[in-house]
Image: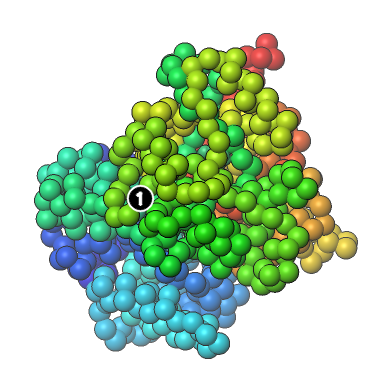
Amino acid sequence: MNFCEFARVCEELEGIPGRLAMIDLISRILPTLSDEELPVFIRFIMGRIFPDWSPEKLGIGPNLLYDGIAYVAGIQKDEVIRNINRTGDVGRAVEELLGRKEQTSFFTEELSLLDVYRELAAIAATGGNRSQKEKLKVVRKLFSNTGPLEGRYLARIMLEDLRIGVGEGNVREAIARAFQVDPYQVEHAFQAINDLGQVALLAKEGEERLKEVRIELFHPVKMMLAQQGSIEEAVAENGALAAEYKYDGSRFQFHKSGATCRMYSRKLEDVTDALPDVLDLLVKATDHDVILDGEVIAIRDGRPMPFQTVLRRFRRKYGIEEIREEIRMIPNVFDLLYLDGETLIDIPLSERRSRLAGVIRDYIAPQIVSGDPAVIDRMYQEALAAGHEGLMLKVPSSPYTPGVRGKNWIKIKPAVDTLDLAVIGADWGEGKRAHLFGSFLLACQDVNGELVPLSKVATGFSDEQLQEMYVLLKDRVISESGKEVRFEPGVVVEVGYSEIQMSPNYKGGFALRFPRFIRLRDDKSLDEIETLESIRERHSRQSTVQQ
Ligand code: AMP
């Protein structure tokens, strides 16, 4: 497949409003691709370059991309940025700029889908001192050989935001239809190996191959997630439940094979080097090859420290030895996904739990099983008194469903009205804060995963937190006009508010009254932010209460 054909498919998909027509189109293309092209096409169409489990990252920010485009279009970077501001989309801006270029120059070679993938993989593999220069060279080369339409999608792929509305669900269905296999088997294989590209290849070979899929060590599995609920309802619906403390720390997945071990965050980033102390503890606690799921908390004087402390450790690259003396990091293990070559996600939680007890000597999160709301409530009060966030209730017969926020895990915590939102823009601060961002534009997501602006937040930040926000966001700037900047989305924050109001000022029709910053949620990814649908629900619930 040539990259220009791929771009035309993207354009067609971008114009299709309905999900079924999208699935139909993708499913007709998949059987026409070679074994090498198939996984690349699948990832690209979802705006991804590498498998989700893979540590490979492209590692280029918007600025480097603009440099490359400016060079190829024969203009200054400022002009690239002005174009992006005007069109509101990097892809469209690149398309327009390359359109101008086309009249004056010719391509040197026609790029195939695989050429583009190989060049991007080469960019990802470039490290060391000269890396930015080397990366820029490849970016220039790629854009010199693309026409305007390909440029639109290449730029968006590089920012891993394709904006054509093709998500995992659509692709799973398209794979099942293309190769006539059971959609359940596609989903199940995806949960275990966490790469739809690879799943498509197996589906092509037949359903039996999908059924043989096993979890692999050092390919992190998506984390199972929880829904909010109440003790009474959960017991009424399920009977006896397994109850554990809900620790307010950070999720981890620990993989160990012999003497080799690695640790992954909730977003599946490799955080092994940031947490040598936690790794030490876990390695000493087991003699088996395992994948463990748990939550690490920071302890000082016997009490859990604020969750932010743990997150900072996950991000830390330097000075780890000094800090590990001050704050003790403790893992709390609550699940076992793999044991000595065996994949355990399909057996019931109660069995996984009893295997866990025989596998690690320490750090298992205490658990009770009870169908009595009063007993569970007592444990909940105990959890809060000890400084934890609340309780997790789990259905004992349930399998481990990676990436699913289902009804088998229910979180119980005190009601606080907060929202997790994406930071999509900011204004520069004033006075002594002029070198930092001052107020931030936040967005929720609609059903297609498009970001919808909802509110600005300027209060609730300490100086230290503003500094932290600046460090996290400075390389994400994609455009700037006057005091306003726009970011490549990716950073998530939790905010409080007094009320959700109808508002003509924002596209989604809602705005927050008295928003205030609570904390950074850089353990959460964009697909976990609040949806417009749930904002609407909260608004109507709130209106009922007011009446
Ligand atoms: P939330 O982030 O509010 O959706 O709550 C789910 C998160 O709670 C999980 O992703 C874990 O990071 C965390 N958690 C804390 N304690 C537990 C536990 N015992 N079992 C499962 N998840 C837990």
* In the image, farthest residue toward the right: 431
**Residue 121 visible within the image:** yes
Residue under the point 68% across and 11% down? 547
**Residue 489 visible within the image:** no
Residue under the point 52% across and 59% down? 284
The location of residue 205, given as percent across then percent down, is 12, 55
Which one is nearer the viewer's eye here, 206 or 1? 206
Does ligand 1 reach within 8 Å of label 1's beta carbon?
no
Residue under the point 71% across and 49% down? 299
Q: Which amino acid does label 1 sit on?
A: Tyr
Which one is nearer the viewer's eye here, 169 or 425? 169
The location of residue 258, given as percent across then percent down, is 39, 65
- Locate ligand 1 by image quadrant: top right
* In the image, farthest residue toward the bottom: 130
The location of residue 295, given as percent across then percent down, is 56, 47
The location of residue 174, given as percent across then percent down, is 22, 46
Instruction: Decide: few, some or many residues near mark 1? Use Cα within 10 Å; few <14, some 14-19, many ≥20.
Output: many
Secondary structure state at the residue bearing disc 1: strand
Relative to 96, 324 lies left or right: right
Q: Quadrant of residue 289?
A: bottom left
Q: In which quarter of the image is residue 448?
A: top left
Residue under the point 17% across and 40% down? 182
| Residue annotated with mark 1 | 338
